[in-house]
Amino acid sequence: MLPSEQVARELIVDTNTPGTEIFIIDAEGRVVECGIRKLQAELPLAMYKIRYRVGDRVTESLIELAPGEGPYYAEPPELPIFSAAPSAFTTGTQSDQVTQFSHELIDGPRVDRGTGARLFVFVSADRKSDSPPPANPAAGVSIHKFSGELVEDLANSQTRFGCAGSNLNLDPGHYLLRAQVDAGDPIEQMIVVSPGWQTRVYIRLGEIKTLPPLPLSQPTAPNPTPGWQIDLPQMGVIMVRDLPHTAPGPDDARWTAAARQALAAGRGDAAPNREMMRALLAGKFENPMLGIYAGHLLALQPEPDREILSEVYSNLSSLIGRHPDVDALLIALNDPRAAELTYVEPPMLRASWSLVVRASSAQRDLRPKHSYAARMSASLWGSGAWLSWRMPPPETDTAQPSPEVLQTLISEATAGRLAERLMALADRKKELTPAERMLAAQLMATTKSVQFANELTAEQDSSSFFGGGKYILPAYRYFWDSDLQRQTKQKIAAQLNAEKLSDLTGIPYFTVLEAASTLGQKLGLGQSAHMRSFRRNA
């Protein structure tokens, strides 16, 4: 065919990055082709826009698909991938120094806190900033057991080039990464270390450009890195085998970061396709975190490929053993083994947490009563791929959970008898647990809804046909509600109960009831003869 007669040509776009969505857009703004990681399509000769999406970040390029021999290979621009791992930084003298420093820490002596697994934590200040980095970027980071025992305070870690890191020998298991990100209570995340593997955690420290928002809790500690803030949502995690001189592959940090960004944005469409997933499985997921991300991206799809998802679960289980985020895939698979799952501690990923909440009920909550997973449920923080929460207050003796107390509170709020007490308690919100604050906010919203319905009813009554409406109808309303008042109260009754509140907030059913009991005490509600005692004190 002569070039002048050519009307179409094959276009190939290869990002070499799972989790990257590719869209080909014509001059009319229509998406004519799309794919994941790699796209091949026969298209008419024309100008096209190629959009690359990684999670919630997008970059674009323009190409002219002109006549020519063979396929047209479109060179992707720099993809919008963020990774805190040094290997993903732009090359240069300073970046090379940071990478070398991180490798020295990994290959150097380890701090012995157990045996069988390893944890490496590396915090680096943003090198694009003109401000000098803090003396120790990791000063606000520490590792704890769920019992509260301190494992390692990174304030004691080695520092160089605006970076700090610690390399630990640990017993396999679950640990808390705790970080002071503002003046409020510390933020926590789960870190899993598996037998025979090293978990590597990379955290970026960013310069604070504006005043931070007011904390949700009472200030507890000054910022250990003044002018800088830990960026936990963009934390990077990879896993490598615990063997001498083991290093991740050249694409590991980039691939894992892209998959994490896709998961954070809920982009199930970015899940690796069957061919790509088979290739990853054949490689045995040498970085299991990539497999965990890929499995949860598959689980986000309306109709996931259960055969592939089951294979992901089996491969990961054989590689790293029991892992809360791998176990959560059983829920997505509707596997009978999911009925035996228990989450005493929360998982690492927010996607896993969503599955746990979805599978929980008033009859059987996967988060056992008074477990850490139950206690932190009312303190979720931030957004992104990671499950993060404010450090929950120490566990105290709680009142006996009672649906009757919750119903009493709802009835009193609906009757308008709680407004002043709730307002007074709001001024002392530091005395409330997160679950109590949630319930108090719901009761206040209920009070305002009923109050609004009452005001509208009074306005309608005052302009009614009856000449004596100003006096007769208010007395009538004392015994009979208007349609608006009745509908408002019916809606409240249908929506405001322990099960609905648990579904709405993700807080365990029994925790909602316990919060009702303790909140009732703080509002002056006795433990027996609930309604009588409360009204006497009102």
Image (tube, rainbow, N blue to C red):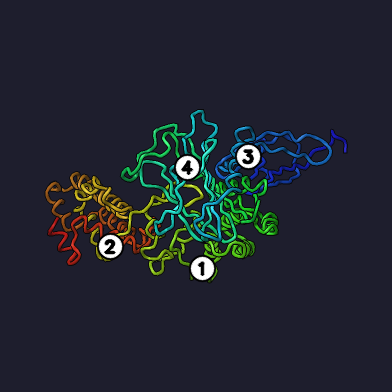
CB under 8 Å between callouts 2 and 3?
no
User: Mark 3: which amino acid?
Assistant: Leu
Query: For mark 2, does the 10 Å Cα neighbourhood hold few (<14), some (14 to 19), or many (20 or more) residues?
Result: few
Q: Position of residue 289 (x, y in %)?
A: 58, 54
> In the displayed structure, would residue 208 be above or below residue 490?
above
SS at badge 1: helix
Q: Residue at x 76, y 39 (%)?
A: 73
Disc 1 designates what residue?
Answer: 338
User: Mark 1: which amino acid?
Assistant: Ala
User: Looking at this view, is 392 or 298 the one in front?
Assistant: 392
Q: Position of residue 464 (x, y in %)?
A: 19, 47
In space, the residues marked 2 and 1 are separated at their CA atoms by 31 Å
Quadrant of the snapshot with the C terminus: bottom left
Whether residue 201 is visible to the viewer of this picture, yes or no, is yes
SS at badge 4: loop
Which image quadrant is residue 301 in? Answer: bottom right
SS at badge 2: loop
Quadrant of the snapshot with the N terminus: top right
Q: Earlier in the sequence, mark 2 or mark 3?
A: 3
Which residue ends up furthest to the top in the rendered image?
A: 130
Whether residue 35 is visible to the viewer of this picture, yes or no, is no
In space, the residues marked 4 and 2 are separated at their CA atoms by 35 Å
Disc 4 designates what residue?
Answer: 138
In space, the residues marked 4 and 3 are separated at their CA atoms by 28 Å
Q: Earlier in the sequence, mark 4 or mark 3?
A: 3
Query: For mark 1, does the 10 Å Cα neighbourhood hold few (<14), some (14 to 19), or many (20 or more) residues?
Result: some
In front: label 2 or label 3 = 2
CB under 8 Å between callouts 1 and 4?
no
User: Looking at this view, is 279 or 450 the one in front?
Assistant: 279
User: Mark 2: which amino acid?
Assistant: Asp
User: Looking at this view, is 430 or 180 the one in front?
Assistant: 180
